[in-house]
Image (spheres, rainbow, N blue to C red):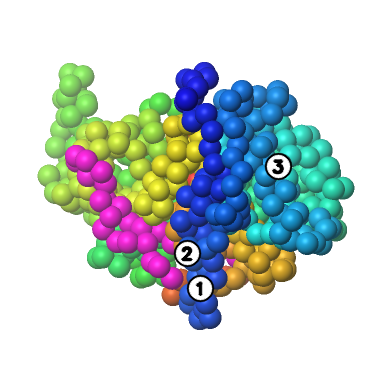
């Protein structure tokens, strides 16, 4: 028997033990006696619920969490949580006060509720696959607001929480930090704003500055030594420039041109013109005047160094151009590059993970461009598993971070400690999105692949994500983005938590 509720098809009965067992194909697991270079990997491990457990959960009259409303009857999620708690209670033989108590703060109501509930679903999968008998997870609704986050954090702390996972937005993180005060409670947040990190607050998000450093360094290693950068005319744009400059300095390259644009304006012509050679600008101006009926004399015009400008000898003083943007703005800039003959056969275009969009290849100037991205294989497997459990719905890209955060908490539970040393294990961890590690200043360092924009089909991997961190994490002036704070554009709406906005750092 199957039931169809609001377009959501589920089997009438699902064996809880089978579900847990099938989900437990991969799990966070310390890989034996690890060296300093060996991350804690996703390996086969025992599911939270033993395979011999015979009890089933009947699905009739149970609304899936992805479709149901909080507080309106018992959901499948509620029954899973009840089952997990009962198994924990029997298996652990410890009281709740002696367990690792994780409070997960998510927007389960409000403008970002759909994303919050999907992240809750992902956390449940992680708990089923990786949950330790000494770990208890409770969920608290932040409503997507600083006030709601403060209230949720206060409740969680009063109930004995000693690790907070979440919240989602930077304004919420600030409120949570205030509630924590001087308590010895760590926070693993999903916010991509580096300015709220530090002082026991760690982000698991992918940050734009690391991506900029990664792609500039990779291009430099492959022969590109002169870079132009097109960036937003705000603090984030300046930070993109500084990250690119740092990477260029480290590899003996240089930033030769910069162009800034207002992200709210549709016309970005001025920004692209700012990186063009003076000879091209002179030629374009003469053509414009002739089109308007003016007579243009062939006079010698000197550049800033006093040298005559030859409009028939146009030479670009950069061999790669970086655009750290997405969507309509990225495509508009790509069209302008093509208009001014900045094409991939002569100039390499570089981007960030926001370029992972099939619409990018529609602009000829961007085809063949390079950008860093997370390993996709892990997320694809996670998405299939998520859809199988939650009725075919695709998880939002950020859901993998919720999974990894809870799986990381399970690692801490197995170790029996919550400390900065445990959280910032220099070998790192391997999660859904590949290798990552949290740094003492709160930022996350992720292992990134390099992708190339294909004219047709999926973008191809030209440099796989490293399996281990070769270098130890460096702090202070030794490492670029790890010692810098930047603003992040985080609107508290459903749109702000799609991949590329909350996760990307904008």
- Left or right: 185 as drawn, with respect to 421: right
Residue 339, placed above or below residue 81: above
Secondary structure of the residue carrying numbered label 1: loop
- Quadrant of residue 438 within the rendered picture: bottom right
Residue 31 is labelled as 1
- Seen at 70% across and 24% down, the residue is 73
- Seen at 49% across and 30% down, the residue is 11
Segment tinted magenta in the rendering? 439-468
Residue 495, placed above or below residue 84: above
Residue 43 is labelled as 2
Query: Nearest the camera: 472 or 34?
Result: 34
- Residue behind mark 3: 82
User: Measured from the top left, where is residue 113 in percent x and y?
Assistant: 62, 30
User: Measured from the top left, where is residue 184 in percent x and y?
Assistant: 81, 61
Crowd around label 2: few <14 · some 14–19 · many ≥20 (10 Å): some
Residue 387 is labelled as none
């Amino acid at each position: 028997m199957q039931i169809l509720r609001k377009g959501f098809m589920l089997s009438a009965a699902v064996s809880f033990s089978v579900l847990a067992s099938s989900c437990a194909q991969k799990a966070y697991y310390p890989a034996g006696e690890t060296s300093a270079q060996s991350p804690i990997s996703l390996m086969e491990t025992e599911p939270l619920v033993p395979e011999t457990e015979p009890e089933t959960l009947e699905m009739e009259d149970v609304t899936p969490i992805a479709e149901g409303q909080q507080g309106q009857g018992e959901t499948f999620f509620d029954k899973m949580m009840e089952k997990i708690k009962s198994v924990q209670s029997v298996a652990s033989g410890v009281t709740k006060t002696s367990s690792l108590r994780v409070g997960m703060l998510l927007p389960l109501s409000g403008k970002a509720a759909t994303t919050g509930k999907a992240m809750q679903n992902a956390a449940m999968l992680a708990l089923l696959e990786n949950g330790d008998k000494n770990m208890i997870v409770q969920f608290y609704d932040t409503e997507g607001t600083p006030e709601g986050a403060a209230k949720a954090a206060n409740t969680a702390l009063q109930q004995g929480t000693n690790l907070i996972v979440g919240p989602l937005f930077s304004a919420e993180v600030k409120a949570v930090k205030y509630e924590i005060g001087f308590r010895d409670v760590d926070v693993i947040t999903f916010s991509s704003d580096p300015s709220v990190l530090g002082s026991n607050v760690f982000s698991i998000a992918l940050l734009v500055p690391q991506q900029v450093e990664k792609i500039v360094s990779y291009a430099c290693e492959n022969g590109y030594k002169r870079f132009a950068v097109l960036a937003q005319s705000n603090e984030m744009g300046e930070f993109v420039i500084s990250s690119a400059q740092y990477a260029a300095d480290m590899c003996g390259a240089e930033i030769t041109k910069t162009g800034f644009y207002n992200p709210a304006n549709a016309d970005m012509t001025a920004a692209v013109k700012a990186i063009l050679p003076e000879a091209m600008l002179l030629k374009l101006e003469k053509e414009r005047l002739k089109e308007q009926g003016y007579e243009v004399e062939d006079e010698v015009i000197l550049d800033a160094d006093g040298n005559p400008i030859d409009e028939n000898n146009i030479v670009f003083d950069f061999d790669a151009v970086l655009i750290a943007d997405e969507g309509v703005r990225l495509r508009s800039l790509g069209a302008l590059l093509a208009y001014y003959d900045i094409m991939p056969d002569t100039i390499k275009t570089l981007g960030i993970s926001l370029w992972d969009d099939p619409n990018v290849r529609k602009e000829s100037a961007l085809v063949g461009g390079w950008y860093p991205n997370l390993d996709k294989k892990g997320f694809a497997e996670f998405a299939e598993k998520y859809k199988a459990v939650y009725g075919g719905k695709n998880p939002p890209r950020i859901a993998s971070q919720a999974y990894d955060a809870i799986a990381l908490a399970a690692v801490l539970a197995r170790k029996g400690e919550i400390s900065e040393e445990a959280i910032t294990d220099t070998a790192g961890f391997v999660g859904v999105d590949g290798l990552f590690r949290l740094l003492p200043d709160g930022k996350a360092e992720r292992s990134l692949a390099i992708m190339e924009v294909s004219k047709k089909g999926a973008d191809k991997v030209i440099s796989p994500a490293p399996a281990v961190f070769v270098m130890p994490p460096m702090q202070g002036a030794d490492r670029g983005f790890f010692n810098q704070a930047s603003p992040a554009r985080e609107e508290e709406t459903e749109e702000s938590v799609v991949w590329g906005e909350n996760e990307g750092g904008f």
